[in-house]
Amino acid sequence: MRGAAGPGRVPSPPPATLPRPRLTALLDEHLGRTPVVLLRAPVGYGKTQLLSAWLAERPELRARTTWVCRLDGDPAGELHRLLAVPPRADGGRPLLVVDDLEVVAGPALQAALVELAVVRRAVDLVLSSRTVPLIPVGLLVSRGELAQVDDDDLALTREEVEALRGQPDALPADVLLERTQGWPAAVRMLVDHGGDHRLARVLASYVDSEVLDHLPGEDRRLLQHAALLPVLDPAAAEAVTGHPDALARLTRLHESGVPVRWAAPERPALNPLVRERLLTRLQQEDPQSAAAATQRAAQWLHAAGRPLEAARLLVDAGEHPAATALLAEGFVQHVYTDTATVRTLLEEIPEEGGWLVTMMRAVTYLLAGDSIDPAVVLATVENRVQSSSAPVPEADQLALTSFRLLMWRSVNYRQEPDLALLREGPLTLPVDGRGHRRAVASSAAVRAEYGFWLLHHGELAEAGSVLNEAVTLARLAEVGWLGVQSLGAWGCALAMAGQNEQARDLVAQAEALASATGVCGAPLHLARLGRAATLVDDLRLAEARDLLDRQFAEVAPQPEHGALLTYLDASIRTLVGHEAEAVERIASFRMSTPHLTGYQRTVLSMGAFRALLELGRLEEAEREVQLMAEVAPPRQQPLVDLSRARLLVKQGRPGEAVPLLRPYLEQPTGLNPRELLGMLATTVVAAERCGDDHLAEQAQHQMNAVSDQVGVGRGTSRQALLMQRLRDRSTMLSPTELKVLRQLDSERSLAEVAATLFVSANTLKTHLRSIYRKLNVPGRRQAVERARLLNLI
């Protein structure tokens, strides 16, 4: 609304005009330093309201103002008359406001007006136009003779939108800004008609009449195709419109009054409401052209590495089969890194989209931590696959296999999968073509899932081999999160097998890849468990505890990781002398987790057995050995025999332990390093107790060699500590040595210790040498630390 005005009269601002002090101050500043001020913005940006409100607040300026606009009977004639008026004798300059410049003045008249203000200094000139004036704007700006206020300045700020909303039930300011880019007329309509069913018609009518209908058909079609993408660049503009000069044409349309904002140089973005209307009209006027243009835009986005944007475009256009195929193609790459976006897109595709939609939705729900029944979901997908008339392509078969394994893993393998296909080795992949990357990614997921299954079933060596394949495939497919997860699982498998040096290297690789690709959370769980296992082996127990607490303080471990986490936690408690807590921790986990794999149950029994052995609760420890014998997979039989041998030693029957261990020492090829070190450490103690010094020395020498080979400290490892704990503590150190050891745990000097014990300095040194040798430590501080771990002090 302009308010009443006649020729030369300043219109009054409408009663509901929004005060915009930042802009009126800007006009004051510009008018004070340049002879010409230009307000240039498309229709609806409030140029006329701003100028009338500005002048209404400045009576002295208003008194010397002449206002010319298209509503005057002969605006061009009025301007010609003003050009002929001689300058005022007192040197004062009137203010000439020319509204609707693009309508009221042609090129010659515009040039004459600028000359009147810039050369003759006869007036202060304010121009308001929807289009770029036919004057050398850039040259005048560079000379300091013209200042501009454009659509970026005139767009409403968040504070101004809040002030305009008024009613508490109006749309939130952020929503209004997102939908309008601050276009004042559009914001006003959304506020005034937000709850009105006629709003869509009102907006459509406004955009049509004020922006689109006056455009030539070719320009309107260009805008319709450009509207397929929210933001354009030169390549995108050419791709979606089919015109090499599309960006230049869009720039010209913006200069002629089409609402376009520039996200960056050469990156225009149509106003969202205008874009919405253009797409609606394209669909109504030419559905076939709309479909073809949508496909063309989606293909360009996909080729440009923006597949999720392409999928959004297809979903919005109702092209659900194409959107499903596109999401399936990049699903493995994006499901972890863009879970929320992928999930939203899938939820907007009807359930009738087929088994692929159901499968992908289920994965996003699972990763988001939603409660689903994997068995029901899996059955639904299987039924839809069976009822589908179309054959399942090879890439989809890979995805389906990976999905089955994931669902089984999510319930910790409550149902055992059919692994016949997976045991055949790496899958054959296409060497080129559009489906290559998807096939590689899907194959990586399949191999990774099989590797996880092997890990949680104790097939550690084979797990490492399969996970190595998964890592290679994940790198080829550039799926960062899967590479991180597979590296971490591989490192965990090696750590559980006692191959600590290689485990540390793989965990470090997983952490480096996670850092480089921005991966965090669940894909790193197995890497953290693997690192914690190596720290426990090195007796860096405080570091291991801190690592586990930090990793799982806020994010609960996945079901299949709970057993390993509990085992490591119990191991730390046992090693620091809190054996009863370790037993309780394992018992609590068993109560809350009824389904475990045989290997997981074996590992937990091993953790409970060690704690019970330290507590001297030998009957309970024997029951744990019996339980291991019942549940352990064949590959874990060495763990059962090792535990039985340790129990025999603890029961004072070392002579029975040695024959049980000897076959493994004579044929160690089937043992992993952890098992072999355990066998050797137990043999050392059993042989010592039997008086077989030769066997004890031989086993100790072999244990040192294996420790060096796999990166485990000789006298500073968990195995060394367990070996010493297995010895009879009453005979390991003499009573006098125990007295000396307890005195070392003080601030006393050695001379003071000798005086306290009433022995000479030389006698004390003899005792110290014996203590250090038996504890396998170099000095006093290490002796105290080892004694605490052995519960000797």
Image (cartoon, rainbow, N blue to C red):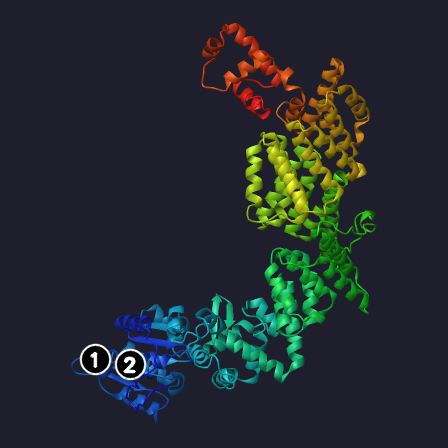
Query: Viewer-nearest of labels 1 and 2?
Result: 1
Residue 634 place in picture, x, y as percent: 81, 37
* SS at mark 2 in the image: helix
In this figure, which residue is indicated by the disc labeled 1? 60
Residue 777 place in picture, x, y as percent: 59, 19
Residue name at image x 40 percent, y 75 percent: 165
Name the quadrant of the N terminus: bottom left
**Residue 355 appearing in the image:** yes
Label placed on residue 116: 2
**Residue 434 appearing in the image:** no
Q: Nearer the viewer, residue 161 or 433?
A: 161
Mark nearer the N terminus (1 vs 2): 1
Residue name at image x 35 percent, y 90 percent: 76
Residue type highlighted by circle 1: Glu
Quarter of the image where one finds residue 603 = top right
Residue 156 place in picture, x, y as percent: 40, 72
Residue 623 place in picture, x, y as percent: 74, 33
User: Gap in Å between the C-alphas at discs 1 and 2?
Assistant: 22 Å
Residue type highlighted by circle 2: Leu
Residue name at image x 62 percent, y 84 percent: 285
Quarter of the image where one finds residue 293 = bottom right
Q: Nearer the viewer, residue 641 or 308?
A: 641
